[in-house]
């Protein structure tokens, strides 16, 4: 077992070149071949529709979930039982919506890698088990769902293979969610389960379609991918909403901070990639499995390809006017699925290696030439990093490592002109997600 160790010395002030060799090793360890095999296996279950057969050992969602569970168990065996693997079951009654045409057990497959320091803090990576064709209630036709979403599912399994070779301070959950196409039922079930179990969910990286590089418009791009995040949580209070008018934060909710974290990690370790922050919950009028987590107040983002091909999504397999419709195996670009899997793996590793984010950050400095920040100390942190940016910038462009303090004054920086945040830094150099100020500092 390797422990994530920080090789470069901690450098204070501004953006320093802090990198961790283990993160590069993790990128390298992700296997295109294994992802390809897993996508093939998943597509070959014929259909993985949520309402499909659960008895057959070769066809339907039952066979698919048993296979996923078995994969997680095999991974666990080779890391000294480091994964706790189980089904999380959710009963959904016929008629709950128009897509639930019979009673069904929506079953998620969960694998938990327990953290050594903060076992109750969880960072989650998800893919979906289920698939669909043109008619969302058609649970018998062939529905390979190779890109949507065997790609995300295979990436999740592969991340578990790679990261189970390491130990982390926080817990990581690898999960295959079901019932996505029928109305996000698996995500709802697991989010509720997390609340009932009092899991402290750091956030969820939901992967939904990570294998297509040829857009329906003909654009081919194997570098760009999208990170969707909602602006602020739907659970915020009226008081928080009012405070935003005067103190800012319209684009700085917890999911947005998670999105910025992913963007930064990718820019640092995979500079060849082109992460695209999209300032919305999901695509226009469309949904994904991070949403049920957002709904209950957890941070969550959607990671996906930049260029979709709608002739290969939710389509009956057929040829029409020379166009081959259907979400089939041969359309998936494996090198790209591998890259996006690595994007997830390095972010899981970084977040799972970091101390928790400061709970409270106070900001002050009105009618003063300097900005003042004060934060609650974090157990396990050995220092803190203040971030700030222009109000129009999507990313934290300026930073200053201030050491093991709990307040700091940024001389000459006027509070009105920037947004600010604070991250906790561990002895290994890994940083928490940034906490946006949630209290006013008055002196
Ligand atoms: Zn879909």
Image (cartoon, grey):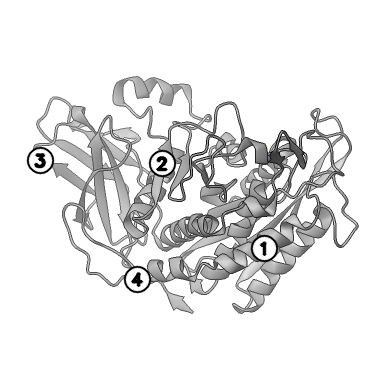
> Going from the N terminus, do you reach mark 2 or mark 3 first?
2
- Distance from the alpha carbon under mark 3 to that under mark 4: 34 Å
Q: Which residue is mark 3?
A: 411
Mark 4 Cβ and ligand 1 under 8 Å apart: no
Please state which of the two labelled residues, at mark 3 or mark 4, is closer to the viewer. Answer: 4
- Distance from the alpha carbon under mark 1 to that under mark 3: 54 Å
Pick the residue in front: 379 or 49.
49
Q: Is residue 289 above or below residue 122?
A: above
- Does the CB distance between marks 1 and 3 fall below 8 Å? no
> Going from the N terminus, do you reach mark 4 or mark 1 first?
4
- Distance from the alpha carbon under mark 4 to that under mark 1: 28 Å
Residue drawn at 51 percent across, 65 percent down = 115
- Does the CB distance between marks 3 and 4 fall below 8 Å? no
> Going from the N terminus, do you reach mark 1 or mark 3 first?
1
Say which element carries label 4: helix
> Going from the N terminus, do you reach mark 2 or mark 1 first?
1
Please state which of the two labelled residues, at mark 4 or mark 2, is closer to the viewer. Answer: 2
Residue 20: name its quadrant.
Answer: bottom left
Picture coordinates of residue 125, whole percent (x, y): 56, 54
* Badge 1 density bin: few <14, some 14–19, many ≥20, Cα 10 Å: many
Q: Which residue is mark 1?
A: 38
Residue 86 in view:
no
Pick the residue in front: 220 or 99.
220
* Badge 3 density bin: few <14, some 14–19, many ≥20, Cα 10 Å: few
- Does the CB distance between marks 2 and 1 fall below 8 Å? no
Q: Which residue is mark 2?
A: 276
Residue drawn at 32 percent across, 27 percent down = 248
Q: Which residue is mark 4?
A: 21
Say which element carries label 2: strand
Residue 185: name its quadrant.
Answer: top right
């Amino acid at each position: 077992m390797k422990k994530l160790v920080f090789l470069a010395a901690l450098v204070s002030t501004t953006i320093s070149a802090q990198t961790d060799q283990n993160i590069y090793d993790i990128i390298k360890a992700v296997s295109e071949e294994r992802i390809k095999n897993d996508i093939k296996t998943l597509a070959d279950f014929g259909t993985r529709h949520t309402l499909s057969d659960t008895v057959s050992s070769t066809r339907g969602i039952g066979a698919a979930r048993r296979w996923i569970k078995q994969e997680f168990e095999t991974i666990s065996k080779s890391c000294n039982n480091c994964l706790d693997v189980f089904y999380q079951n959710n009963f959904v009654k016929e008629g709950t919506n128009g897509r639930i045409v019979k009673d069904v057990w929506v079953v998620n497959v969960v694998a938990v890698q327990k953290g050594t320091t903060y076992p109750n803090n969880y960072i989650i990576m998800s893919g979906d088990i289920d698939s669909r064709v043109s008619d969302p209630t058609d649970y018998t036709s062939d529905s390979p769902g190779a890109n949507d979403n065997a790609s995300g599912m295979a990436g999740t399994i592969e991340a578990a293979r790679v990261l189970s070779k390491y130990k982390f301070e926080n817990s990581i959950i690898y999960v295959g969610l079901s019932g996505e196409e029928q109305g996000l039922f698996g995500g709802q079930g697991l989010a509720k389960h997390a609340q009932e179990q009092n899991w402290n969910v750091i956030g969820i990286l939901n992967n939904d379609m990570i294998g297509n590089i040829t857009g329906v418009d003909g654009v081919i791009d194997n570098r760009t991918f999208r990170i969707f995040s909602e602006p602020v949580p739907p659970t915020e209070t009226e008081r928080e909403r009012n405070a935003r008018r005067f103190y800012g934060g319209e684009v700085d909710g917890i999911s947005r901070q998670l999105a910025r974290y992913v963007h930064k990690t990718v820019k640092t370790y995979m500079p060849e990639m082109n992460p695209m922050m999209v300032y919305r919950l999901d695509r226009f009028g469309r949904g994904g499995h991070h949403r049920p987590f957002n709904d209950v107040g957890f941070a969550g983002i959607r990671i996906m390809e930049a260029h979709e091909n709608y002739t290969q999504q939710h389509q009956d397999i057929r040829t029409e006017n020379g166009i081959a419709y259907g979400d089939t195996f041969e359309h998936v670009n494996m090198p790209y699925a591998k890259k996006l899997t690595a994007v997830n793996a390095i972010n899981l590793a970084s977040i799972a290696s970091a101390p928790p984010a400061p709970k409270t950050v106070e900001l002050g400095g009105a009618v003063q030439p300097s900005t003042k920040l004060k934060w609650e100390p974090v157990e396990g942190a050995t220092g803190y990093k203040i971030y700030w940016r222009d109000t129009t910038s999507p990313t934290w462009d300026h930073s200053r490592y201030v050491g093991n303090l709990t307040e700091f004054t940024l001389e000459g920086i006027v509070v009105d002109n920037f947004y600010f945040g604070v991250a906790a830094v561990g002895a290994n150099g890994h940083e928490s997600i940034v906490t946006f100020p949630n209290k006013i500092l008055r002196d």
